[in-house]
Amino acid sequence: MTDDQLFYIVCYFSVIFFQISSLFPNEAVAVRIHHTVFIPTIETQCSEEQKSMWLKKAHNYEIIGTYAQTEIGHGSSILLTLTAK
């Protein structure tokens, strides 16, 4: 696949994404994370070998990435959050 073809595919999926986001806002968040967190992470933190393995698949939606963050002893409940003493 050439860079031009990939560009057109990305543009096509961007249009689809905006249409989906108006119909299914929860799913749109997942796709937005895929584009704004997952793909840029591959582009900036992977080796060339890893990029060649994963980047095309991510752009073609063969894989969809997301984001999770955890801290030992902490959670999303503000009442149960632990703080250093």
Image: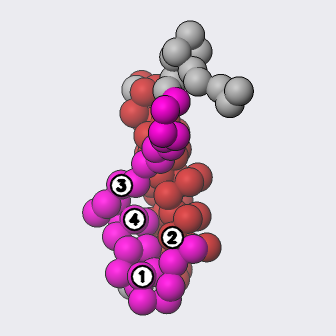
Image quadrant occupied by the N terminus: bottom left
Of circles 3 and 2, the one toward us is 2
Circles 4 and 3: CB atoms closer than 8 Å: yes
Image quadrant occupied by the C terminus: top right
Image position, residue 51 (x, y; %)? 45, 80
Circles 1 and 4: CB atoms closer than 8 Å: no
Residue type at tag 3:
Ile
Residue type at tag 1:
Gln
- Asked if the magenta segment contains residue 70, the reply would be yes
Of circles 3 and 1, the one toward us is 1
Q: What range is drawn magenta here?
A: 45-74
**Which mark is drawn over residue 50?**
1
Measured Cα–Cα span from mark 2 to mark 1: 8 Å
Q: Which residue is mark 4?
A: 58
Mark 4 crowdedness (10 Å alpha carbons): few <14, some 14-19, many ≥20 = some
Circles 2 and 4: CB atoms closer than 8 Å: yes
Q: Nearer the viewer, residue 13 or 48?
A: 48
Q: Which residue is mark 2?
A: 42
Residue type at tag 4:
Ala
Mark 3 crowdedness (10 Å alpha carbons): few <14, some 14-19, many ≥20 = some
Judged from the image, the secondary structure of the residue bearing numbered disc 3 is loop
On screen, 72 above or below 6? Answer: above
Q: Give the number of callouts.
A: 4
Mark 2 crowdedness (10 Å alpha carbons): few <14, some 14-19, many ≥20 = some
Image position, residue 83 (x, y; %)? 65, 26
Residue at x 55% of width, y 65% of height = 41
- Asked if the magenta segment contains residue 61, the reply would be yes
Residue at x 58% of width, y 52% of height = 36
**Comes first in the chain, label 2 or label 4:** 2
Image position, residue 73 (x, y; %)? 49, 32
Judged from the image, the secondary structure of the residue bearing numbered disc 4 is helix
